[in-house]
Amino acid sequence: MMIRFFILLIAVLMTNNVLHAQNDASGAIVGKLIDKEMDGEPLPFANVLIKGSSKGATTDMEGLYSLNNLEPGIYEVVFSFVGYETLEVPNVQVTAGKVTEVNTELGSSAASLDEVVISTVSRRDSEVALLLEQKSAVDIKESIGAQQLARIGVSDVATATTKISGVTTSEASGDLFVRGLGDRYLYTTMNGLPIPSDDVERKNIDLGLFSTSIIQNVSISKTYSAENSADQASGTIDITSRALAGISEFAIGIRSGINTNAIEQFDNFKVSPNQYDVNFGFYDQTVSTENAIKEQGWDPTTSSFPVNRRYALTAGTKFGDNLRLLFTGLQSTSFEYNEGIFREFRNNNLYDYFSDVEIFKKVDNTTGLLDLEYNLNHNHRIKATSLFVNKLTDEVYESGRNAEGVVFEETSPAENLNQFIRDQNIKQTRLWINQLHGFHDFSEKNELEWAVGYNRVNADEPNRIRNEVNIDGEDFVQLGRMGGFQQRKSSQKIDDSEINAFLKDRFTFLKDEDLNKNIFIESGGNFRNKQRDFVSRFFGVTERNYNTVNPSSIDNLSEAFLPENFDNLRFRSLSPDEYQASLQSYGGFANFNFGTGKWNFNLGARYQKDELEVDFEVNNYPSTLPQFANKSYDNIYPSVNLRYSPNENSNIRLAASKTITLPEFKEIAPFEYVSQTGQITRGNPDLEASRNLNLDLKYEFFPSAGQLISLTGFYKKIDDPINRVQDRGAAGVFSYFNAGEEANVYGIELETKLEVIENDNPAGFDFEVGFNASRMWHEQDLKDVYRGEAFIRTFQYNNKTEIGLQGASDWIFNGSLNFSTESHNPFRASIVGNYASEKIFALGAPEVQTQTEVFYNDEIIEKGFVTLDVIMSQDFGAHWGLQFRGQNLLNPEIERIQNIRPSSTGVENTQTVRSYTRGAVLSLGINYTF
């Protein structure tokens, strides 16, 4: 039925389109006009005309202008102002689907054409065009383009998003937070189509994988619009991929650097034995995990040169008048080392403790983007995009080498033994995104856009090696004996495939820029089908008779597993853990926009049906319970976006919407994933979606071009919020629950972007200051669960019936200082700082349901910290560029804490349960553009 619905929708829209005459695809000319007589101030109310036509515009208060809907060709642009010399700029080329920037100045004397700066870039790459788009946008949307990112030296999308107000990243979790709400509440797309995560533990892709060399811009829509999926609460992030700008491109870049923590381990940076099967950043397993018990070693090796490096290449050209091709690729290797502590408490008593946790991490990343664009004619354009990412992560975890480690009940105090744990893992994620887009102008009033996509993700842990042994600090080593799989090798394979599509048609009834009238209706549909196959296998070794196989050292555990020792060892295996999951989501939407004068009203509604099915067969789950979870959500999601513009310099915006937050596959499937520290995360088949009410009120003021001051107030009501919770009755076990009936989030957001010094003199310099801050108040109730009148469980503990939202920070601050020169060899420098206050890592839980104020585990808090980056770049002529990066320079301690009240004293105190530093990263890069 869904397929028939989608085909019918296409047929109706196509029938509507062919009734209209065809017109040419358009380009645009935009720019900024400066008053030469006023020391570089913007020149408002000047005339900008296309010579020989009636097409023209008037500059606004910031000197900005825009000439839209221009047919491709060569134009002469005329700038004039009363009392000033008229300037005529010839040979301005307009390209279909592109924007040409013409920035110049007027004065009482004639300007030289050498002072006119003309550049043709993709429409979504231009900083000026993005600013104009933000001012006129229907919803609350902020974008940052590759042009600006290059100017301030930002190299990846994750860092780019932190330039947007209310956005921060967590060093501890790696998650992106928008208005204090993290991964679960975001929705990520590329060119309007959903893209999968590279990490099955997260809903959204790691934006750090996207180099700014493969994007045009990244935007965050902080309010919901009916054309987007309703599976979001804090925003939709859309990445617009690179396309060829101009006729040809060819550039290469090399960067090398160090992690200050990792370089201290230069002669002893550990990697797993899996590295013997790695070539050029790709892992190819030569021995099956089962056979690797005997045929592969168990001890780590070392990396010969733990220095970060990165290589990049961009090449593109135009074939004839219609075909454009662009390829951009990069390969990088990075190293990270951290050292810290780990503690685990159960029922306010210490269970596990290690004071010397070490993690060695090596990451190889290979990325390639291919973009192909073909103009069928001036009315129709086809665009194909393919993105491939191979991310290979090798981690070696060790704890207890100092012979002080403790694992609860592994040995008795009388034995005078402590515990040592080593966990070696290699994770390979292969992500392949393929998209085909069509853009069609059937008339001046009717535009159609469609897209289809096919995504594949293979996220594998093909050979994870774990050893748990007992040691005395001298020469005695004993294999762990309290579990059947303390010496093991395991594999985990995840295969995701997804088909998605959208169709969007806009019919414009009236558009008059002079009268500020814009009336249109937009309709379309979306489809998404995602499938997952998951399988995990455990293979282990135990002693037939206790304490008969003793390695000589913790650095030579392999000798315990030699073939001749298997007379005293027993091979063991578990039946596979498996689950198959599917998500099918489809919807249709309609938006009506009525803009007249100072007002713009946009009303939308979306019908969306989401069907989640998870079938599982896993160990450690009761066979008497259903081995599946099927969930269906069928709703209409409305949106309202209002904009009032008192003058050309300001906007007042109001937005309201309803959305949903769907649970992820891994949050439902009850497979138990064991972390390096031994903590377990498992899904909950009873988990349900959250429903969200979103309200925003925003004031924007644009003092001049490139400057912005805004203040936003927002409110979110989340029904049945999803939380990561410490499960009852087990230390170190985390699961996902709808722990409260309702969560409420209030917040204010301030953003400023000021040009303190703006100088067009080649001998001068520019200085910009950017700052944004968010303050949030949030709380949720902790509920009691009943089945009928029978009490099942409670989420209340330690006399707490309310608590903050998991993952939300009260305060977020982002700031940047940007310095640049205007010479022919420009120098640029940026200092970027960030602070996010503490957030709840995991909610607590009661141990005894009838005595929750005495027997409980308190929530775990991730403490706030400050990060600081410095980036400097220098151009040398038209081809060479040099860049220095200093990232995470303060190298703050990442710390999680928990309040503990031992029953022996009854006195509450705060304990650190995890801490480490990630090291500062210093790098130097060189680029050459042909």
Image (spheres, grey):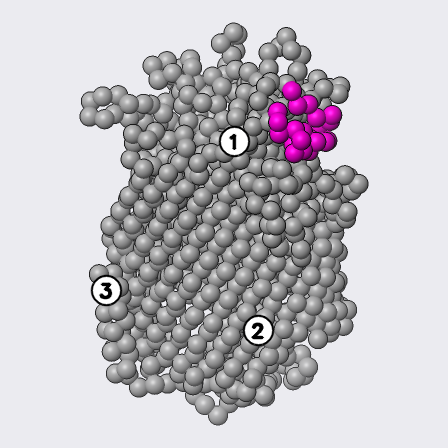
Left or right for 487, reference 525: right
- Rendering coords of residue 131 (x, y %): 50, 64
Element type at mark 2: strand
Identify the disc placed on residue 326.
Answer: 2
Residue 556 within the segment the image draws in magenta:
yes
Task: Depth check: give the residue in front, 540 or 844.
Answer: 540
**Distance from Cα at disc 3 to Cα at disc 1:** 52 Å
Identify the disc placed on residue 5.
Answer: 3
Amino acid on which the number 1 mark rests in the picture: Arg
- Rendering coords of residue 890 (x, y %): 69, 40
* Quarter of the rendering occupied by the N terminus: bottom left
Left or right for 908, reference 929: left
Identify the disc placed on residue 452.
Answer: none
Q: Residues within 10 Å of mark 1 (few under 14, many from 20)?
A: some
Comes first in the chain, label 3 or label 1? 3
The residue labelled by disc 1 is 572
Query: Which-is-in-front pick, marks 3 and 1?
Result: 1
- Rendering coords of residue 544 (x, y %): 57, 22
Amino acid on which the number 2 mark rests in the picture: Leu
In this view, the residue farthest toward the left is 788
Element type at mark 3: helix
Amino acid on which the number 3 mark rests in the picture: Phe
Q: Residues within 10 Å of mark 3 (few under 14, many from 20)?
A: some
Q: Residue at x 26, y 47 (%)?
A: 632
Query: Which-is-in-front pick, marks 1 and 2?
Result: 1
* Quarter of the rendering occupied by the C terminus: bottom right
**Distance from Cα at disc 2 to Cα at disc 3:** 36 Å
